[in-house]
Image: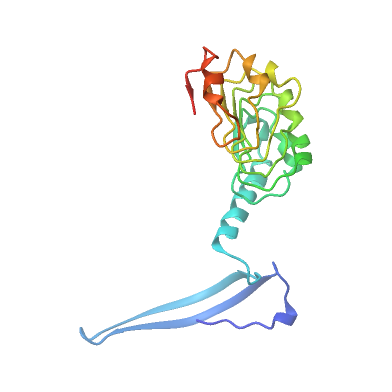
């Protein structure tokens, strides 16, 4: 079945209702068999640009699922994934999820300014902002006094904000960033048990880690 529309009459994201009244016939000559299927109804279509893909459709679906969550007690949600959505912004509605403990914002295109929107989510225990092309760590991190696991893998971060060492982080993933020397803030973090920092330009970082007797796993 082929449907042709006049592009001058529609724009991207317009909806089109197509009425279908068709009879499909299947013939199997080898078995002398004929079957028919009658289709009658309305097909709802959405106009897309030529760059549209199934990946974008999947992203749209997940973003809509997020907005659906905001309509039904978002304050009861403790875990939220907004990763791999090619987002350039954090929806303002994120502030409604006041009891979030786990938030994944990895693999997006978020600017440093966008992280102000999550500064009030003070129950966060696990946060991933990996793969966002950030050149500095959002200072809003310091608001998360319950933060235990932080993933900043594959950004362009070269230092931690002042006061970072007061956080009670247990696991820190900071591989593939732009650190040139071993961060002094880490030396005073007695809660830290897992530290992953390969892929930076830090000379002899393993010896520095070994001086931190509480570390149980690292690379």
Q: Quadrant of residue 52?
A: bottom right
Q: Nearer the viewer, residue 120 or 114?
A: 114
Q: Quadrant of residue 127?
A: top right
Residue 197 location, x and y as percent?
A: 56, 30
| Residue that appears at 67% across and 31% down | 75
**Image mark count:** 0
On screen, 118 above or below 26?
A: above
On screen, 160 above or below 59?
A: above
Colouring scheme, one of rainbow, by chain, secondary structure, one colour: rainbow
Q: Nearer the viewer, residue 25 or 85?
A: 85
Q: Nearer the viewer, residue 92 or 152?
A: 152
Residue 95 location, x and y as percent?
A: 74, 35
Residue extending furthest toward the left: 31
Residue 192 location, x and y as percent?
A: 57, 18
| Residue that appears at 70% across and 69% down | 14
Q: Nearer the viewer, residue 169 or 58?
A: 169
In the image: residue 113, left or right of residue 42: right
Q: Quadrant of residue 42?
A: bottom right
Residue 25 location, x and y as percent?
A: 37, 84
| Residue that appears at 57% across and 81% down | 3
| Residue that appears at 65% across and 47% down | 108
In the image: residue 135, left or right of residue 218: right
């Amino acid at each position: 079945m082929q449907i042709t529309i006049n592009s001058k009459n529609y724009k991207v994201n317009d909806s089109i209702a197509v009425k279908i009244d068709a009879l499909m016939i299947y013939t199997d000559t080898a078995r002398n068999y004929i079957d028919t299927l009658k289709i009658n109804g309305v097909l709802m279509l959405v106009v897309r640009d030529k760059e549209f893909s199934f990946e974008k459709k999947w992203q749209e679906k997940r973003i809509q699922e997020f907005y659906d969550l905001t309509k039904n007690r978002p304050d009861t949600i403790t875990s939220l994934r907004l990763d791999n959505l090619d987002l350039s912004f954090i929806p303002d509605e994120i502030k409604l999820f006041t009891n979030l403990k786990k938030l994944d914002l990895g693999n997006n295109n978020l600017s440093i300014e966008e992280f102000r929107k999550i500064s009030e989510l003070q129950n966060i225990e696990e946060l991933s902002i990996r793969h966002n092309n950030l050149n500095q760590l959002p200072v809003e991190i310091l608001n998360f006094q319950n933060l235990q696991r932080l993933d900043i893998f594959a950004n362009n971060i070269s230092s931690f904000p002042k006061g970072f060492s007061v956080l009670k982080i247990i696991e820190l993933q900071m591989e593939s960033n732009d650190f040139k020397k071993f961060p002094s803030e880490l030396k005073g973090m007695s809660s830290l048990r897992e530290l992953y920092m390969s892929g930076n330009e830090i000379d002899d970082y393993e010896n520095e880690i070994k001086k931190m007797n509480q570390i149980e796993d690292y690379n």
